[in-house]
Image: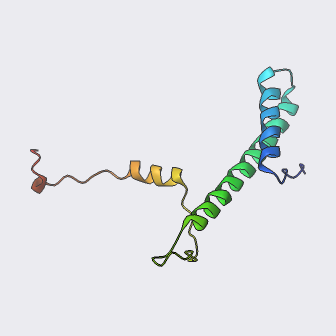
């Protein structure tokens, strides 16, 4: 079982950078490279999770109701990348009524 990821985002990011340098230098054997790669994936997931949580907190803190009070509705997370991917997937429907010749 591998070591748990560090609690602090910056510590995870620093360790991830070390893992990348180790893999890029090419001096590690296959088994060690695979272990380092697995550790890097775990660290990356940890960093993404922490960023997602931070984004949610910022959105909640920035929200306000019409009377200026905090918006305390439950937050449903949709990351910016998910929104962008959805926008790319949606293609506008063209109908004969749009005035575009077929």
Quarter of the image for residue 72 reads bottom right
Compared with 1, 22 (above or below) is above
Quarter of the image for residue 10 reads top right
Q: For this rendering, which residue is in front, 7 or 64? A: 64
Q: For this rendering, which residue is in front, 83 or 34? A: 83
Residue closest to the far front: 68
For image coordinates 84% across by 28% down, the residue present is: 30
> What is the number of callouts on the image?
0
Residue 58 position in % (x across, y down): 61, 60
Quarter placement of the C terminus: top left
Q: For this rendering, which residue is in front, 38 or 40? A: 40
Scheme by which the image is coloured: rainbow
Residue 74 position in % (x across, y down): 58, 75
Residue 43 position in % (x across, y down): 77, 46
Residue 42 position in % (x across, y down): 77, 47
Left or right of 25 on screen, residue 50: left
For image coordinates 86% across by 25% down, the residue present is: 28
For image coordinates 77% across by 49% down, the residue present is: 9
Left or right of 85 on screen, residue 70: right
Quarter of the image for residue 70 reads bottom right
């Amino acid at each position: 079982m591998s070591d748990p990821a560090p609690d602090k985002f910056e510590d995870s990011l620093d360790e991830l950078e070390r893992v990348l340098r180790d893999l890029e230098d090419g001096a590690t054997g296959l088994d060690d490279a695979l272990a380092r790669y697995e550790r890097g994936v775990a660290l990356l997931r940890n960093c993404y999770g922490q960023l997602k949580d931070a984004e949610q907190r910022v959105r909640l803190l920035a929200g306000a109701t019409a009377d200026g009070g905090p918006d305390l509705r439950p937050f449903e997370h949709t990351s910016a990348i998910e929104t962008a991917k959805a926008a790319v997937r949606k293609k506008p429907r063209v109908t004969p009524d749009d005035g575009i010749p077929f």
